[in-house]
Image: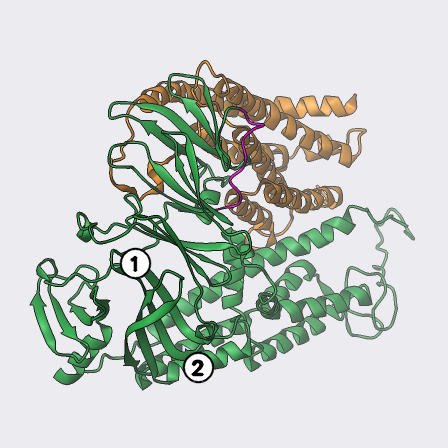
Chain colours: A green, B orange
Amino acid sequence: MRMRNPIRYVATPARVFMTLVVLLIAVAICQLFALESAQTFVVKAPAQEELTEEQERAEKLRLAAREFLPDGTLHLVAGDEPRDLPAHEEVYDANGTLLWAGPPKQRPYQYLPWAAEETVLSEGGIKSLEEVSPGSFRTLDLPVATATQTREIWRYCHRGDYFVGYATAGGHIGYVGGGGFAASQSQVRPFGPFRRFAAWCPTDSYSPTLVWQTRSRIYQIDFEQRQVEQLMVSPDSELECLYVHHWGALGVEETEAGTREGYRPLLVCRSADGKYHLLLKDPDQKLTVALPQEWEQWLGNLHGFIATAKGVFMRRFWVEYPAPPDHYATRAYRLWLDGYIKEDRTRRVELYRVNDRGDIDLVNSYSWQIPARTLSSLAWGRQYEAMQRATNVASPVFYDFLWWLGTFRPAVVYRGVVGQLIRLAEGMRPGLSVGSLLLTAVLVGLTFLHARPRRRSTRAFVFWLVFVGLFNLAGFLTYWALNHTATIKCSSCGKLRGLHQCDCVRCGVALPRPEPGRCDLMLGV
Amino acid sequence: MRFLALVRKELRECLPWLLLAGLLLLVAGAWMLRYEAEYVQEKLAQPPRLAPGSAVIHAYRLTRPHLLGGPAKWLCVLAPGLGLALGIRHFWMPLYTRTWSFLLHRSVSRLTILLAKCAAAVAAFVVSLGVVWTVLYWYARRPDVFVIPASARELVVGWIYIALGLVVYLATALSALSTARWYTTRIFGLLLAGLATIIVLSQWNLGRVAVLLVLTLLVLASQTVAAFLDREF
C-alpha cells in the first residue's frame, strides 16, 4: 500500500485556503461591479423639487451658519456657493430679519472664533511613515535653522519614542525626550505612546516648535533651546483630541491674522472621561470643565471653546434626539437609524460662559427644525438598499459573523489593507436575508449532488457541505475548483461513481478491469 | 555531494539573472547613494522652507525619504522580478525544453531535486540582492559620509523585499507545476503572491510582517512540494 505523503496534510488545507481567499476577492469584485453598474444604470436619483420663494428663504436660514457676537448675540450667516468661500453673504438676526448683505470681507460684525484642531501628523500618519512600502517609508526630521542655513536636524526615533539630534556640520548632539534634553541614550526618557503633534515657527525663528500629544501628556518642544515643557498631564484618563487658538501661530485663521487683541492663547484637550482641560495664557490659567452627565444621552454634542479678555466661552451644538446605541452592529442601532431618518428633529446651539472654577452658565440658545427625509429621497435610498441586498445575496454568512464579531473587536484592527478588507466584508454581509439563505441552500444541494458519487470519506463530504454553507458562492467555487473529477456509470448498480476511489460508494464493487486484448504482452496484471 | 552538484547546476543556469539583478542594484544603489550623499549635505545646509510666525500645515515639510529610500525602490522591483525569472527558469523552462525527464531519472529523490532548486534560489537572492543591500547599508551607516546614518530598520525593510521575491518565486513554481488551466486555479498562486505583497507593503509592524510572510511562504511552499512530488512529467 502506498504511504500518504505527510506534506499533503499541510498542502491540502493550504490549497483550500489559497483558493478560498482568491475566490472571495474575485466574488467581492464582481459584486461591487454589479452594484456600481446597477447604481449607474438602474437606480434613479431623486428629482429636485421646485421650491417656492418662501421655502427657499426658509431653506437658506436652515443651512445658515450660527455665529455668536462677543456679547452673546446670535446671528444667522447665509452665504452663496461655494459655501466655504462665498462671494456674497447675508446676515440675519435670530428672528430671521435681514441685518446686512454684502461681500464677507466688508461684514461689520466680528464673531467669536473657536479653537480648532491643528494636526500635522496623527497616530495613523506617523505609523504610515513606518510602512514597509518604499513610497511611504520616510523619516520625521525637525530642523534648527537660521535664515541662511540649517544647523541641526532632530530625527524622531519610532522605536525609542524620542528625538535624536545631529549637527549638519557632522556629529551627534544628543537626545530629546519626555524628561528634556539628554546627552546619552541611557538618560533619555521616552515621550510615551504618540497621539498627534502640531508645529509652528515663532515669529523670530525658522525652527519649528512642536505641541506633542501622547496618551496622557502634552508637551511643548523647542529644539532651538533644547527645552521640553510639560503642558498637561492626565494620569487617570486618556487624552483624546487637541484644539488650539492663537497658541503660538497655531489656530489662527487667515481672516483673524492681526486680530489677536482681545483673545487669550488657548489650548483645549478632551480626556476619555468627557472632561475638557483648558490651558490659557496671559495670565497663565488651567481650567477643567466637566459637562453634565445628562448631555451624553443626546445626539451631536459638538463643543467649542474660546478665551477672550472678557471671559471664556463654550459653544455646544446638539440635536434633541436620543444618542445612537454604542455599537452599530446591533438591531437597536438599525431601529435608531430608521427613526432618525423618518422623524423631524430639533437642532440647538447654545453659548455658555465658563467661570474660574470650570462651571458653565448659559448665555444664549437658539433652536431650529431639521425636516425628515422626503418621500422621494427615502424611495431612492430604499431602491439602492434593495440593489445592495440583491448583490449581497452571494456574500458568505461568514461576513455576518465578522460583523457580529465587530462588537468585541478593538478599532485598531480596522487600520491598513486588512482593516479595509474587513470593512468591505462587513459592508457586503448578506444579513441572513431570504435570498442569501435560498442561494446557500441551492449551492449546498448542488454540492451534495456533485460530491456524493465522488466522496472518498464521510468526513470530507460533510466538511465540504459545511464549507459551502459558510462561504456561499465563493465556497461553492472553491469546492468545484478543487474537486472536479470525472465520473463513470457503475457497472454493477448503474449509478455515477468517481474515478478517484477503487470501490463504488453505493454497492462497493471495484472498478471494472478492461478486457485483455490479443496483443497485450502482460496478462493478469 | 549529489545535492551540491544539483545546487551548482541550478545556480549555473540562473547565473545570468542573478548577475543582472545584483549588478543593477549595486550600480543603481551606489549611484543613488553617491548622489544622495552630495544632495543631502547640500540640502541640510540650506535653510528649511518654513516661514517664521506661521503654522506648519503639511507633514511633508518635516518628513523626508530614508537614505536608502531610492535603492529600496529598485530592490522592491528587482526582488519580485528575480523571483519571477528564477521561477520560470527552474520550473517552466524544463517543461518547454522537455528536460524534466532527464533530471528526474537521476539517482536522487524528487524532494532532493526540489530542495536543490529552492536552495539555489535562496542562495541567488542572498548573494545577488542580500549581500549587495547589506553592503549599501554598511556604506550608508558611515558617519564620515552621511551626517545622519541609515537606521537598522532600512536594512530590515530591504530583507523584507527579498523575502517577497522568494514568495513570488514559489508562486511562479506552483503555477508552473499546476496542471490546471490558466483561467482556473493555475494562476491562483501568483494572485495570492500579489495579494500578500500588497498587504505586506502596507504594514508598519515588523512582527505582523514576519507572520504574514511566514504564513504565505508556508501556504505556497507546502503546495509546491506536494505538486512536485505528485506530478507526472
Q: Where is residue A304 shown, x and y percent of the image?
A: 33, 62
Pinpoint the chain carrying mark 1: A
In the picture of the structure, the residue carrying the numbered disc 1 is: A306
User: Which secondary structure, mark 1?
Assistant: strand
Q: Callout 2, which amino acid? A: Asp
Q: Is residue A192 located in the magenta-colored stretch of the structure?
A: yes
Q: Which one is nearer the viewer's eye here, A367 or B37? A: A367
Q: Is residue A284 visible?
A: yes
Q: Where is residue A29 shown, x and y percent of the image?
A: 48, 61
Q: Which one is nearer the viewer's eye here, B152 or A42? A: B152
Q: Is residue A351 above or below residue B57?
A: below
Q: Which residues are magenta?
A: A184-194
Residue found 87% across the figure and 64% down from its top: A510
Residue found 45% across the figure and 65% down from its top: A290
Q: Which mark is residue A338?
A: 2
User: Which secondary structure, mark 2?
Assistant: helix
| Prevailing SS of the magenta stretch | loop
Q: Is residue A382 visible?
A: no
Q: Is residue A338 above or below residue A230?
A: below
Residue found 56% across the figure and 43% down from its top: B205
Mark 2 closeness class: few <14, some 14–19, many ≥20 residues within 10 Å: few
